[in-house]
Image (cartoon, helix red, strand yellow):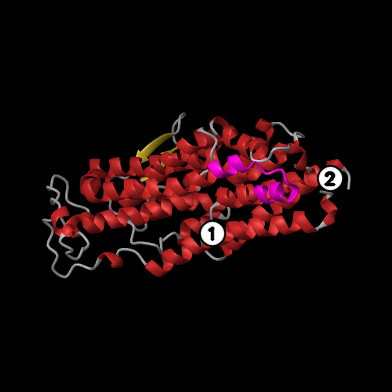
């Protein structure tokens, strides 16, 4: 097959991967805002598309360089034929995760497929892969402990500042007024200061998550094509971001509809906390060229936040004596504005559920399992293909 048709097929496969990225990342970013009827799905898709592109254009090239140049010692293995196969395994494995209803890690899946190509050809940069793997272990641990500290010591105060009540039906709290020459934001007529603050916060956090997704996930769609040297970085970023935008406006509507978070009973404030912690870690790692797994970091942050909130009824001295931990009602509910947040150990523990009731352990285990199975499918499938199928010429 000529190079030009292969390049077209490769770009189309990259578009398919980007399309799936847009569909799977919009829900986690803007699901809380849409679910609380703060903004519409169309506005969520538009904001996701814009901020994904900004992240992809500014910080994304560092991660693209890591995957497209530094993860292997010889970039000549990135032939058009091999890149079509790499992108096929990335997109196919992610499709399996989406079909199972689990938001798999696109970064781990992409790195696995590219690393498999490097292993099969003997050109894998083990030092670079080791550095990435270390951060994959360290980053979720950081997310867990930071979220745990926030949940134990700061969650009620944050909740009292930004929490908003979910409004079912009716007009979204934040909309765009297009009646004038310049469009402007307008808020619901009954929204008070606290609700406006919460609305702006939850939308702003969604934009931050969109930016973070762009910094890391753009490489998963375009790095193999970039590694060939046939297409420059900027056109690939534009193509990948456009594909993501199509996913945001189409299949993402399903994830926005069904986002009820089976892992934990996650209030809007908790979703904001998890998003800030996870996005901050992902942006930090992307800035040094590490393809970070937002999904895994966010999952561990959710568990850490739940653990921290669950320990608010127990002081450190009580914990040292081995007393049973109970969930803090004060930390789970939205306190009235101006109400003093209960101190640690002050909450009434009568008829309060155990900490294990805060999130579903079986669902959490299934999510974590699939988050590892999907990258494994991509890695093993790609390795066997490149190692034993002779059409790639390695």
Mark whose residue sits in front, 2 or 1: 1
Tag 2 residue: 5
Mark 1 element type: helix
The crowding category of the residue bearing disc 2, from other C-alpha atoms within 10 Å (few below 14, some 14 to 19, many at least 20), is few
Q: Is residue 115 magenta?
A: yes
Instruction: Name the image quarter holding residue 374.
Output: bottom right
Q: Please give left or right for residue 250 compared with residue 369 in the image.
A: right
Measuring 60% from the left and 59% from the top, which residue is drawn there? Answer: 376
Q: Main secondary structure of the magenta part?
A: helix
Q: Please give left or right for residue 308 compared with residue 134 in the image.
A: left
Percent position (x, y) of residue 381?
Answer: 69, 59
Point out the tag, 2 or 1, that comes first from the N-terminus: 2
Compute the Cα span from label 2 to label 1: 34 Å
Instruction: Name the image quarter holding residue 127.
Output: top right
Percent position (x, y) of residue 378?
Answer: 64, 57
Mark 2 element type: helix
Measuring 58% from the left and 53% from the top, which residue is drawn there? Answer: 250
Percent position (x, y) of residue 379?
Answer: 64, 55
Up the image or down, 293 lies above or below 186; here it is: below
Percent position (x, y) of residue 33?
Answer: 39, 49
Q: Please give left or right for residue 347 compared with residue 181 in the image.
A: left
Tag 1 residue: 372
Q: Please give left or right for residue 119 compared with residue 367 in the image.
A: right
Measuring 41% from the left and 60% from the top, which residue is drawn there? Answer: 261
Give 107 or 196, whichever is nearer the viewer: 107
Up the image or down, 88 lies above or below 279; here it is: below
Kindly indicate whether the residue at mark 1 contacts the one at mark 2 (C-beta within 8 angstroms): no
Give 131 or 372, whichever is nearer the viewer: 131
User: Which region shows up in magenta?
Assistant: 114-131
Q: Is residue 10 visible?
A: yes
């Amino acid at each position: 097959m000529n190079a030009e048709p292969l390049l077209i097929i490769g770009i189309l496969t990259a578009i398919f991967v980007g399309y799936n990225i847009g569909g799977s990342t919009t829900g986690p970013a803007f699901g809380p805002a849409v679910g609380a009827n703060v903004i519409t799905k169309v506005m969520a898709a538009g904001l996701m598309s814009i901020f994904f592109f900004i992240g992809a254009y500014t910080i994304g090239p560092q991660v693209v360089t890591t995957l497209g140049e530094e993860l292997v010692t010889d970039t000549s293995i990135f032939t058009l034929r091999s890149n079509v196969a790499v992108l096929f395994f990335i997109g196919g494995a992610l499709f399996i995760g989406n079909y199972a209803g689990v938001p798999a890690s696109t970064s781990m899946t992409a790195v696995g497929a590219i690393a498999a190509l490097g292993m099969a050809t003997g050109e894998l940069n083990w030092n670079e892969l080791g550095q990435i793997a270390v951060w994959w272990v360290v980053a979720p641990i950081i997310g867990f402990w930071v979220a745990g500290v926030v949940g134990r010591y700061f969650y009620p105060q944050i909740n009292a500042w930004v929490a908003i009540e979910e409004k079912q039906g009716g007009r979204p709290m934040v909309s765009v007024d297009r009646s004038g020459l310049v469009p402007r934001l307008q808020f619901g007529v009954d929204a008070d200061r606290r609700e406006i603050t919460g609305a702006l916060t939850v939308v702003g956090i969604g934009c931050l998550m969109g930016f973070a997704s762009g910094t890391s996930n753009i490489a998963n769609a375009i790095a193999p094509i970039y590694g060939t040297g046939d297409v420059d970085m900027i056109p690939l970023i534009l193509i990948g971001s456009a594909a993501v935008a199509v996913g945001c406006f189409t299949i993402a509507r399903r994830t926005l509809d069904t986002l009820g978070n089976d892992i934990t009973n996650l209030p809007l404030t908790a979703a904001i906390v998890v998003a800030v912690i996870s996005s901050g870690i992902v942006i930090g790692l992307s800035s040094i060229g590490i393809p970070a797994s937002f999904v895994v970091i966010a999952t561990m942050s959710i568990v850490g936040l739940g653990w921290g909130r669950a320990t608010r009824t127990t002081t450190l001295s009580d914990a040292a004596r081995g007393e049973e931990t109970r969930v803090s009602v004060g930390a789970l509910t939205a306190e009235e504005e101006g109400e003093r947040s209960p101190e640690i150990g002050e909450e009434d523990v009568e008829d309060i559920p155990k900490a294990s009731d805060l999130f579903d352990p079986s669902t959490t285990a299934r999510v974590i399992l699939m988050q590892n199975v999907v990258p494994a499918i991509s890695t093993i499938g790609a390795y066997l293909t490149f190692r034993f199928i002779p059409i790639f010429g390695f």
